[in-house]
Image: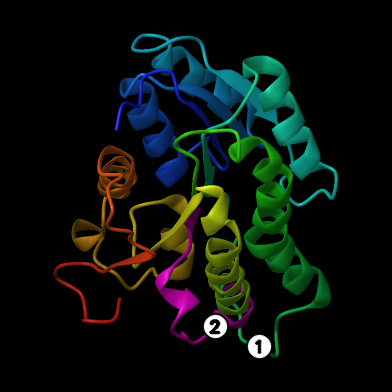
Amino acid sequence: METKGMIALITGASRGIGESIAIRLAAMGMQIVITGRDADKLEMLKDHIQKIAPKPHIIVADISAPDTPGRLIGETIQMFGGIDLLVNNAGYAISKSLEETDYHEWDHSMAVNARAPFFICKEAIPYLRESACATIINISSVVGRLGYVHQAAYAASKHALMGFSKVLAKEVQPLGIRVHTIAPGGVATDMVKTMRADIDESQLIQPEEIADIVEFFLRHRGNAMIDNIDVRRANGTPFA
């Protein structure tokens, strides 16, 4: 599929997986909107991207705020006139036992990992339906299908993300919108250092490897449809 000129929105783009995906999409000739909370990091990414692609649009936003989904899609449409690709990547995780997890931590996990992507998708659908190559990619996690000690809130939120993604895929299929999820194990990001300090860093999946999968989805838009890709560490257990 021809990707040059496509319009993409990537959440959680200031670092890690989101940053790598944004750089890859820019290299593929896309016009991109990058969003996150860290304005300085986004400006650095913008400077990097401008060397290989047209100037990206930055939106500094708290993904957990109720008005953020409408704002992200509204600014994307105002800036570029449409949207072809939505990548819900922003994530939040804590490493605490269920007994230690408080209401704020539970609510914030659900707001960032489940509620925000749910309503960003909702806001985007009216515009994605106008695209000839409409795609939604939700970045989940291995904990979206498994459970790990001290990750109850994170696991619950990622299970919710996987659940609504399955329903969404069926609902928008008649509109020509494709929904994919990517569920990686340990990726070399700031988050994994907090959540899985036990993993040897040399064995972690690189963010660029997740960007490879995103590119594959977009380059190979044929009759075969991939709903979800589970990604594990080559030197890890078969489950993570």
Q: Picture coordinates of residue 131 (x, y %)?
A: 53, 33
| Residue 94 in sight in this render | no
Q: Residue at x 52, y 57 (%)?
A: 173
What number of labels is visible?
A: 2
Q: Which residue is at the far right?
A: 67
Q: Which residues are magenta?
A: 138-154
Cβ atoms under marks 2 and 1 closer than 8 Å: no
Q: Which residue is mark 2?
A: 150
Q: Quadrant of residue 168?
A: bottom right
Q: Mark 1 = which residue? A: 98
Instruction: Report the amino acid beneath label 2.
Output: His
Q: Secondary structure at mark 1?
A: loop
Q: From the image, which quarter does the C terminus lie in?
A: bottom left
Identify which residue, 101 or 205, lies in the foreground: 205
Residue at figure coordinates x 55%, y 79% from the top left: 151
- Residue located farthest toward the bottom when viewing the structure as drawn: 99
